[in-house]
Amino acid sequence: MRGGRFEKRLHDAMRRLNASIGFDRRLYREDIDGSISWARALEKAGIVDADEARRIVDGLEAIAEEISADRFSFSEDLEDIHMNIEARLIERIGSTGEKLHTGRSRNDQVATDLRLWAKGAAGRVIGLIEELMAALVDTAGRESDVVIPAYTHLQRAQPVLLAHHLLAYVEMLARDVVRFRAAADAADVSPLGSGACAGNQFGIDREALASSLGFAGVTRNSLDAVSDRDFALDLLHAASVLMVHLSRLAEDLVLWSSAEFGLVRLDDSVTTGSSMLPQKRNPDAAELARGKCGRVVGNLTSLLMTLKALPLAYNKDLQEDKEPVFDTVDTVELILPVFAEMIRTMRVDAGRAAERLRDGYLEAISLADYLTRRGVPFREAHRITGEVVLEAERRGRTLPELPLEAYRKVSDHFDDDVFEAITVESALRDKTVVGGTAPDRVRAEIERWRRELAGRKSGGRRRGKKTHDNREGRARE
């Protein structure tokens, strides 16, 4: 790369600063796939002949085997994965290898590699999200009769089915899947053939090149193509929202598994002990997810700041794109399977859940609804109910324990049937609207999600467009 232009060798500190091989080596398969397609495009353009193209492809596949078998010596002096592979190719096949980089820049090369990697990463994460969704749906079905308090402002509000609560997270995760699909689609255009910044000068067929790599299309502006990292931002944004959702679920699990709540018991396989206190069972998986949420959101912020005010076209700042992307995907791929296991194996204390329904006057809205159905304007019903709750507090009773005479003391709209109207069963049963917590409605949602997830699994999860494997293409040839 320095060629004949420089008189002095690179300073050791500058060499260490400049090198990216420590992290971009994981792009080796994408880089080799891109190089194989590029070699065939050069053959089609008449830059290399058929024998030279074959030798290049064979050499690249041999290098891929070396790297996968951990027999490849990476060099920091060669800076990055691109030059490490190219240098090894020249070492293996001689001067023919020097023709591979004709008309290509590391600028469009790395953009291509990262897009291919991002597409694959998005697909893997989608699969893991759907596994967590399935665990939530299965647990919702297993615990479909358990009723817990729903909270607003972390105060007990109304009775809901635990299954309804779990399905709320399924809805969040379904939106995460949509975001990751969009990120995969954003990455699904090929910048290869854009050169350093102005485009290719040898008449390379970019559409055919893109198709050979499994891309849906090509970029339309060479300046934008080599400097665009919006697709990486989309991937990091999708991951950040996912981690926010997992952090919210983590908080519920931490609270529910505490002695103060006692609603669930997390399995030994996903909890840890204390170095000092022998009785402890700590929900560290959930706590780590909460902590790592900040790390992932920070990665998004990091790349946003890297791109801020960056002039066209490529700048070395863009070397900072890969570490936050890799770290983010590694993080979510680590956390999601643990969450799926945590949800599958947790045990719910239905008796403790029932006790939690007793306090907090969760029947109050049902009482106001009872009055509303008797023709009392809601605001008046709200006031009357508040007075009944105040009377119950003074007597140290729950609303079902309060005698009818106490109700009638507040309002003559109350009759004997008021006690049936304020049962937990009644409170659940009348929430029959779409999205409500009525048992029949929730069971229908469980079945809907089971069918949906089974359909995705049997039909194959969407991974963006078709994926590329040069080894298969070579076998077909």
Image (cartoon, rainbow, N blue to C red):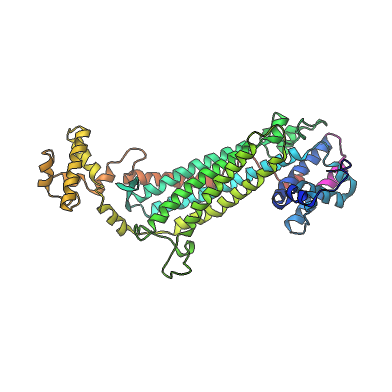
Point 25% across, 49% down: residue:
424
Q: Residue furthest top?
A: 220
Quarter occupied by the C terminus = top right
Based on the picture, tell me whether residue 48 belongs to the magenta stretch: yes
Point 69% across, 51% down: residue:
23
| Range drawn in magenta | 45-57
Find residue 50 and report its image quarter.
top right
Asked whether residue 133 appears in the rendered view, the answer is no
Based on the picture, tell me whether residue 228 belongs to the magenta stretch: no
Residue 216 spot, x, y in % from top left: 66, 35
Q: Nearer the viewer, residue 418 or 281?
A: 281
Residue 106 spot, x, y in % from top left: 76, 40
Residue 258 spot, x, y in % from top left: 38, 59
Q: Relative to 165, is 107 on the left or the right?
A: right
Does 381 sit above or below residue 12?
above
Find residue 237 and report its image quarter.
top right
Residue 27 spot, x, y in % from top left: 70, 48
Asked whether residue 168 appears in the rendered view, the answer is yes
